[in-house]
Image: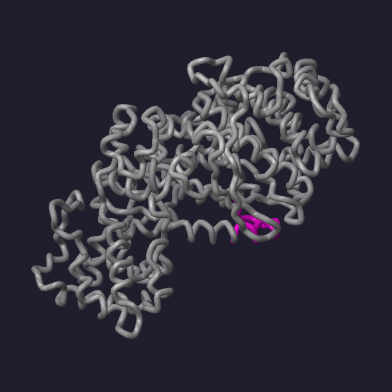
């Protein structure tokens, strides 16, 4: 969500947020928000899809050094009414413009997978919410009486007893020798005391100011935060006729029961004091405000049981709109081992495809992997059903109906039969089992996806592009990092590849970026299908597997992406097109050369001629 202008409004007030030394406490972290905050860091090479594991590891190391226990909640589904869909659509349109300018501001397709893998490697407890995460975050923080860490200004409104730590003031890089993190702490109590208002008016204030769900300005009721506190004070004396609670009244659970109206609804009787009169539809405005107020009432969550006992949310406690989820999906969805957008599919709601840096004169790279998604849809909905996808067409966001399909191997699919599940996966990608002979198990999925990509990508990847991608996989496989006396030891091949990364970053080649964005999307959809089929192929590691070894008190790890490092692959294309040979980059290391040749000889059409047969890279 988000309330436009609220953060700067509160910062301008000065005394509402208090300086604090944060340590020795639990904290509930808005995972999706922190994920973006850490990725959009100057040290991350965003134009090439650079990895950001280093930032994530340093961040959680700083927390651990200060005795802070993080619990991360990541966005999963959204609200059942799609009130936020318009906001998501506009964000996607904005990303198209950003991608077209080859500028910073886009999240790589595989970055979320990397984030979750790093959290797992570090032993950081995390959960993927089955609905929008804000309510679950607020509920868990209230239950555990600990603060929330986020940069989402909606948490200025949720009445969380232990408060809210804005990430923009959370100086984790400056964790002191006293083992605390300098930060600022906000509480609703400090806000209400500053303005001398009833805390129950805060949801009214937020709803009137406008968020992703309520926008009175568009309904003809302009409102300015700069005069909000003057108007809010009227609510302390002119509420709906009943007793007005004192400013320090506090319900520690922030819940209501029975037939009593939610806190704040009494103030709607005098909402005209804040938004004025006129010829506009006041009834519609009041209805929108009432719905907006409910957004900020903290409801009982369903994730405490998962964090405490590792159990799936109780199906009986889930809201009605999640009843479409089969019971067996609840635990893997919460653990983040099933893609959250399958919730949208099962609810027959539109799906917005990811936007990447591409050549916008060419079709969207998402089209390349659409046949994989069609099987994903077919396994969830049955053959012949349709899913509405929003995707880029040129520089515009358009919708189309995508039909669900099932390969022949899926007609009698039994999920407890590994061979049958593997057959469904390989048939979808058009790869035979013999193709993967000699390929290490953990590279089976990315190699199968790469074979699919080279046949379906448009334009077809030329030899340096394919060589660069395979060299990146080999280099990652060569790396088996271990921590020796506080230093990281890596394979010689990856160490040599690192030398390319240290060179000044070049501007991305649009053609190269377009083809690799297609591979990334094929990989993302291949991972999703593999997860839905209960992992017939081992899941590859997008992040370094040795993080648990590397995160020791004396070590700050510099982790490399195990699956795709955009900066490295772009540099390799430049080297290969300049005449450098793969063997020279592999330093003639026999095992690496053999692996490269094994992964680089697909059974299928040649990317150079379009003819069948085997060819080497």
Residue in view at x 12 percent, y 68 percent: 244
Where residue 555 appears, as percent x and y from the top left, is 52, 31
Q: Which quadrant holds residue 157?
A: bottom left
Which region shows up in magenta? 94-106
Does 198 sit left or right of 209 as displayed?
left
Residue 434 in view here: yes
Q: Which quadrant holds residue 477?
A: top right
Q: Is residue 99 magenta?
A: yes
Does 230 sit left or right of 40 as displayed?
left
Does 106 sit left or right of 459 as displayed?
left
Residue in view at x 48 percent, y 16 percent: 416
Q: Is residue 210 magenta?
A: no
Q: Which quadrant holds residue 546?
A: top right
Does 595 sit left or right of 301 as displayed?
right
> 419 above or below 501?
above
Residue in view at x 43 percent, y 74 percent: 218
Residue 489 in view here: no
């Amino acid at each position: 969500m988000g309330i436009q202008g609220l953060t700067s409004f509160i910062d301008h007030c000065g005394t509402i947020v208090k300086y604090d030394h944060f340590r020795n406490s639990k904290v509930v972290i808005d995972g999706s928000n922190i994920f973006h905050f850490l990725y959009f860091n100057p040290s991350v090479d965003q134009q090439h899809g650079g990895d950001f594991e280093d930032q994530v590891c340093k961040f959680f190391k700083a927390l651990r050094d200060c005795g802070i226990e993080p619990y991360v909640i990541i966005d999963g589904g959204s609200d059942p009414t799609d009130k936020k869909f318009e906001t998501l659509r506009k964000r996607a349109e904005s990303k198209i413009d950003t991608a077209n300018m080859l500028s910073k501001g886009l999240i790589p397709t595989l970055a979320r997978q990397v984030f979750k893998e790093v959290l797992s490697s570090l032993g950081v407890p995390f959960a993927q919410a089955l609905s929008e995460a804000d309510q679950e975050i607020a509920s868990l923080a209230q239950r555990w009486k600990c603060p929330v860490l986020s940069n989402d200004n909606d948490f200025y409104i949720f009445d969380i007893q232990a408060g809210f730590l804005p990430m923009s003031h959370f100086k984790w890089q400056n964790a002191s020798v006293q083992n605390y993190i300098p930060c600022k702490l906000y509480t609703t109590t400090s806000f209400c005391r500053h303005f001398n208002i009833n805390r129950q008016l805060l949801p009214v204030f937020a709803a009137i100011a406008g968020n992703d769900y309520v926008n009175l300005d568009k309904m003809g009721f302009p409102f300015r935060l700069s005069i909000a506190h003057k108007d809010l004070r009227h609510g302390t004396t002119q509420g709906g006729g009943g007793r007005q609670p004192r400013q320090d009244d506090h319900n520690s659970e922030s819940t209501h029961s029975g037939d009593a109206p939610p806190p704040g609804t009494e103030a709607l009787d005098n909402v005209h004091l804040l938004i004025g009169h006129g010829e506009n539809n006041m009834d519609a405005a009041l209805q929108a405000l009432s719905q907006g107020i409910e957004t900020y009432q903290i409801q009982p969550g369903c994730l405490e049981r998962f964090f405490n006992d590792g159990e799936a949310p109780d199906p009986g406690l889930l809201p009605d709109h999640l009843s479409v989820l089969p019971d067996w999906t609840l635990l893997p969805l919460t653990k983040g081992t099933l893609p959250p957008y399958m919730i949208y599919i099962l609810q027959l709601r539109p799906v917005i495809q990811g936007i990447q840096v591409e050549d916008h004169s060419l079709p969207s790279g998402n089209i390349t992997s659409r046949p994989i998604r069609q099987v994903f849809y077919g396994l969830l909905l049955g053959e012949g059903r349709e899913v509405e996808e929003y995707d880029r067409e040129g520089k515009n966001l358009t919708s189309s109906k995508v039909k669900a399909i099932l390969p022949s191997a899926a007609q009698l699919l039994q999920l407890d039969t590994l061979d049958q599940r593997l057959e469904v996966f390989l048939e979808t990608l058009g790869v035979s089992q013999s193709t993967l002979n000699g390929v290490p198990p953990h590279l089976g999925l990315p190699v199968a996806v790469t074979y699919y990509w080279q046949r379906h990508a448009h334009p077809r990847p030329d030899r340096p592009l394919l060589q660069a991608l395979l060299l990146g996989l080999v280099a990652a496989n060569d790396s088996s990092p271990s921590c020796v006396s506080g230093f990281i030891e890596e394979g010689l091949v990856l160490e040599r590849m690192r030398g390319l990364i240290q060179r000044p970053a070049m501007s991305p080649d649009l053609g190269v970026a377009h083809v690799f964005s297609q591979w990334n999307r094929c990989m993302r959809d291949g991972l999703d299908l593999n997860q839905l089929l209960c992992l017939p192929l081992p899941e590859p590691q997008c992040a370094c597997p040795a993080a648990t070894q590397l995160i020791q008190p004396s070590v700050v790890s510099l982790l490399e992406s195990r699956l795709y490092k955009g900066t490295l692959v772009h540099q390799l294309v430049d080297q290969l097109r300049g005449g450098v040979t793969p063997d020279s980059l592999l330093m003639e290391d026999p095992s690496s050369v053999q692996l490269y040749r094994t992964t680089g000889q697909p059974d299928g059409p040649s990317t150079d001629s379009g003819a069948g047969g085997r060819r080497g890279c």
